[in-house]
Structure formats: C-alpha cells, structure tokens
Amino acid sequence: MPTVNTQGNPDNDKVVGSNPELSPTSPNEDSDGALLSPVPDPEPIPGLDGVPVKCKRAFSDEISDAELSPMTGYDADRKESYTRITPFQEKHDTSVEFFYKPITLTALGIGMIALAYVAMTQDVLEEGKEKRWVGVYAVIVSFLMFSMIQFRDGPFIRPHPAFWRMILGVNLLYQLALVFLLFEDLDSARSMMKYLDPNLGVPLPEKSYAEDCTFSLTTIWNAIDVFCLAHALGWFGKAMILRDYWFCWILSIAFELAEYSLQHQLANFAECWWDHWVLDVLLCNWLGTYLGMKVCSYFEVKPYEWRGIKQTRGLRSKAKRVLSQFSPHDFTSFKWGPATDFTHFVAVVLLLSVFLAAELNPFYLKALLWMEPDHPIVIARLAFVFLWALPAVRELYQYLNDPRKAVRMGQHVWLLLATILTELLVIFKWGKGQFPEPLPVKVKWGWAIGAASLVLYAAMQFGIPNARRYIRRQKQKRKGKSKAQ
C-alpha cells in the first residue's frame, strides 16, 4: 500500500480517492501507531462553499503525519488546499477585479522599453551633471517599480495595494539615504544638499516667537500666520492616524512641553505662553483633531457595500464609483486601552515617544542642514511621514490586539520605526558641538518627575494588583495541599 503524503503532493487526491476510508491527515495503514491508537473522527472538509475550516496549526515539513492527527483544537483559519494558509493581508477588492490580475511580465516589458528609449535618446546631453541626474531618476523609478510589483501587501487595499507598496518603497529609499548620511560629517552633508538645491548651504538665522508676549488681540492676530494652518492640517492627519481623542490630546500637550524643554537649543521653540496653549493647543491642534475625528466617525458608521464599475449604471454613478475608489474599503476604529494591561501601556508610551521624535526630528534636521521651514524637502518629508504612518499604525494596532493573525510586526511599522531611529542617530552625530547650551536644571527635574510618574502609575495599576493575585493563588495552593494531606 503506498504511503499517504500530506505535504502538498499533488498525488494526494488520487491516493485518498482510491481508499475513501483514509483522510489526508491520517497515518499510513502499515504504521504501528495506526494499529495501536484509536481511529480519530474524520476532519471537516475544508473550503466547503467557500467557508474556511479551522485547524490546530499550520502544516510544516518538520511535522510528521502521526503528529498531525488527531486534530482537536482550532486556532487558525485555513482555506483550501490543505497546505495553504491564507495571510490576513491577502484580501482583494473584488469590485474592481480587473486591477488585481497579475501583469508582472507586462510591466517588466513596458519598463524595459521605456528604460531603453530614455537611455538611447539621452546621448545628446553632455557628460556631466545632467546625464548623472537622469541616471539617478532612472534608478529611483526602477526601484519603485519593483516595489509596486514585488513587495508584500499591507493592510490597505484602496486605491490599490500597489500604491501602498510604492509608498513603502519611498520609505525604504529615504531610509537608505539616511544610512548614507549617517556616515558623513555635517559639512559634507551640507555640501551634498547643494546638489538637490543650489540655494542651500547658507547659514540661516533662527527665528524666535517670544519677542512680544503681551496678551492682547493685536499680538495674537499678528502671531497668526501660515504655520497655524500647517498646525491644523498636521493634527488633522494625526487624528486620522491615531483615531483616538485622548491620544491626540496627550500628544499635543507633550509636544508643547517638549518645546519648552528644548528652546535652549532651537530658538524657534521659544514661544509666548499664549502661543503654546491658546493658539497651538486650544485653537489649531484642537480644530485639526476635531475635524480628523469627525472624518473617522463618518468612515466608522458609513455602510460599505461596494459594486463593480460594470454593475454601476449611468455616467454620474460611474464617476462617483471611480472617486469612491480613493476612499477606504473598510474602517477600523482604534481603542488603544493603555489601562487594560501592561503590554498596552508600554506600547502606548513607546508609540507616544516615537511620535514625539517624528515631530521633533524635522526641526533639528532643517536647523542642522540650513533649510527653511517651507522648503520643499521639509514639506515632502512631512507629507510622506503621514503616508508612511497610516498603514504603519494600522499594522501596529493589529499586532497588539490580534496576535493570532498578525504573528509578526508588519513591514510598514518596522521600516518607519527604523527611519525615525536613524534620523535620531543622524541628529545626535551632527549635533555634537552645535548646541552648546546645557540642559536646564528645571527641565531635568521636570522630565525626571514625568518618568517617575509613569513608573509609579504602572506599579499602581498593574504591579500591585498582579502581586496580590499571585499571593492569593499561592495561598489557595497551600490550602489545597494541606487539605489533601
């Protein structure tokens, strides 16, 4: 009798079909274990009518047939065939199925034709700067094209997973550029920035916003500028990323405290008290957070019933369907729950720290590289961090709250975390000797008290209750042993 193989052999169906009493996961009839062990109940048929069947664990080449049977527990969704586990990221927008058909070879052919055409028609350029820049652009486009085709899908499928793969590719390019700059000194980096913009490389004076702190309508009106709109737009984006009122408020207050702490290093952190708490927190930040959370609430309660473009009748309805392709396919509200358990508390504190670092890094980078706040490179960095953070925070939330599906940290959150940390390394390296003012004593005491408060809160909220539960369990065990004796 031939041995039944359950490890993806295409001949499985033939062998099982010849003997209907055998299941694909049953041991061989000639096996001693099969004779000595009771016959298990038949396993449910997977994928019946498109409904996934749950199994105990994923199949692996290292697990024998005897170890796989019988299956009594269910903890993972499995779809046909037996050897395929469907990742939770692999979901397609079936209303536009045409755009999910694989066209990798077609894209490769079109890309090579375009590359050959550009390379062959650029010979009229003189050797030097212009031709080198064409080569740089070709490298970037080629890398992003590979990212769109071959990177893994993330949590978002609108407007198309390929768009978010390209966003991940841009993040990777930026990370590689940061790694390169990490091995350069500050003067060399400033010289390199002239290749991107010849107007760079000139020292810029830091502007202070604490010159006239008189609390009056005139001074407040004079302080309102385009950066107030930037504040509101920024906090609108943060609300869309975090999807939590309390988290946004804590982050808003923490950023203002960070500005107080670091104004001895950067002059533009020095602001009037009403600029910190009235214009920034109560006006701009609140307005952006409020509008962002309203949009989140709309997406949360909106019914999502998608129809294909072919099934939509009328030009107006088709145009509306095309525009809706750029809206979310579904929406998940975030409930971070820092008081639920210690893991969530640590995750929220770390996420808050990473967000603060992401907010402070551009201020230091533009000061070290002599760039204006409205320079296109600074604005592009802020815009791309928003696009990188959208899927990254979604993956982090999935990783924390649904570990059975998200068994490892997602690629977006991993790469964004690496990017923020690399920016910090660059700032620490280039900042040596650039900020000679020591940290004020009151700032040291303030941050020490804040850190101690976090530790004390964790001890009171999680440490002491867990210790009490442990002591009660030990007492119950001792009582049980004494009664048994």
Image (cartoon, rainbow, N blue to C red):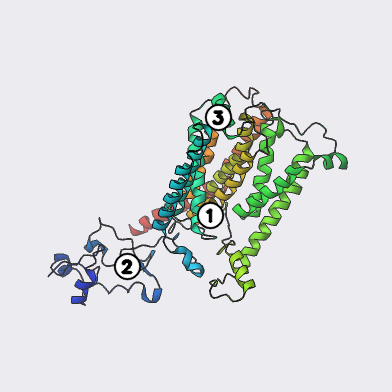
Cα distance in 3D space between marks 1 and 2: 29 Å
The amino acid type found where label 1 is placed reads Arg
Asked if disc 2 and disc 3 are in contact, CB closer than 8 Å, the reply is no
The residue that label 3 is drawn on is 192
The residue that label 2 is drawn on is 81
Nearest the eye: 234 or 72? 234
Dot 1: what SS? helix
The residue that label 1 is drawn on is 394
First in sequence: mark 1 or mark 2? 2
The amino acid type found where label 3 is placed reads Met
- Where does the image place residue 481, in percent across and percent down from the top left? 36, 55
Residue 420 in the image: above or below residue 157 = above
Q: Which residue is drawn at 69% across and 49% down?
A: 233
Query: How many other residues sit within 10 Å of disc 1, few (<14), some (14-19) or many (≥20)?
Result: many
- Where does the image place residue 485, in percent across and percent down from the top left? 32, 57
Cα distance in 3D space between marks 1 and 3: 35 Å
